[in-house]
Image (tube, rainbow, N blue to C red):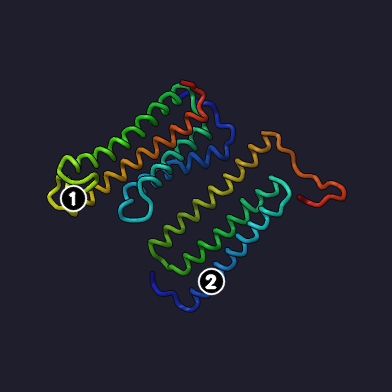
Amino acid sequence: MTEPGLVRTAVSAVLLVLGCLAMLSASVGILRFPDFYSRIHPAGKADTLGITFVLTGLMVREGFTLVSLKLLIILVFMLIASPTATHALAKSAYIAGLGHWKKEKGKDAP
Amino acid sequence: MNRRPADNPVAATVSALLIPFMQIYALYLIAHGDLGPGGGFQGGAIFAASLILRAIVFGLDREEERRLDNIAGLLAASGVLVYGGIGLLCMLRGGAFLEYPALPFADPKTAYHLGIYGIEIGVGLAVAGAMLLLFMKTAGSRDD
């Protein structure tokens, strides 16, 4: 790893913090959303976004090396696999007949 | 080959794309286990996971199920055989169980390296076989 300069360190730090924020919001979303279908939104989308930010930040920090190539391969794998897993989960829940959440009167989300 | 069409075209396309890479990566983990992160256990688990993913997404007909069942048992048993065989070979050569320098190689360093290599392969086979067996016995349709 070549020692990153000021600009690269700053860019990678910003990307890493953005990724952590996205992952944190995904975790809060999984805990707070009311039912299965809305919970897989943070699991599938915000998580993928957070991983993209974190891995891109690490790649910027690393520069053009074999390690950053491996990070890129992991990133491509995650970008393909994570939405597919979410899709399969949602479809099998729909086929199994899981209903969606409706807001009841005078009752807040669980 | 007689195969039922996949229920889910998205999952089918993506798994067809990713399964070869998963298997290559599993073999890489087993082969690279003594030099870097990973090793026999992880490699075997990923290899079995690729076969399980294929079975879940595309389904198995009866012939394939019977064959996979047999292969899983064979893999698990031969993994234990490789592991124990290397250990017992060390004992036969006058060392302790798994004392690699006792293996019949000229250089103790080479013996150490190849001994760990063989152990990793054994662990990989055993883990892949055991995971496949667990899947086949809990999700399979045969009861014997």
What is the three-letter code of the residue carrying label 2?
Ala
- The residue that mark 1 highlights is B101
| Vertical position of residue B144 compared to residue B45: above or below | above
Determine which residue is flagged by label 2: A13
Q: Are marks 1 and 2 on the same chain?
A: no
Q: Mark 1 Cα within 10 Å, few/some/many (few <14, many 20+)?
A: many
Q: Using the image as rendered, state which of residue A101 and residue B122 is in the foreground.
A: B122
Q: Position of residue B112 (x, y in %)?
A: 22, 51
Identified by mark 1, the residue type is Pro
Looking at the image, is B51 positioned above or below residue B36? above
Q: Position of residue B51 (x, y in %)?
A: 45, 36
Residue B140 percent location from the top left of the image? 50, 27
Q: Chain of mark 1?
A: B
Residue at 50% in and 40% down: B15
Looking at this view, is A63 or A90 the one in front? A90
> In the visual, does A17 lie left or right of B118?
right
Relative to B40, A36 lies left or right: right
Horizontally, is B5 left or right of B134 in the view? right
- As helix, strand or loop, the secondary structure at mark 1 comes to helix
User: Where residue B64 sits in the image (x, y, percent)?
Assistant: 44, 25
Q: Residue at coordinates 41% horizontally, 35% vertically from top-left?
A: B130
Q: Tell whether B36 sits left or right of B109.
A: right
- The span from disc 1 to disc 2 (Cα, nearest Å) is 48 Å
- Judging depth in this view, the residue of B80 and B39 nearest the camera is B80
Q: Residue at x 68, y 54 (%)?
A: A31
Single out the mark in the foreground, 1 or 2: 1
Task: Mark 1 and mark 2 in contact? Answer it, CB < 8 Å.
Answer: no
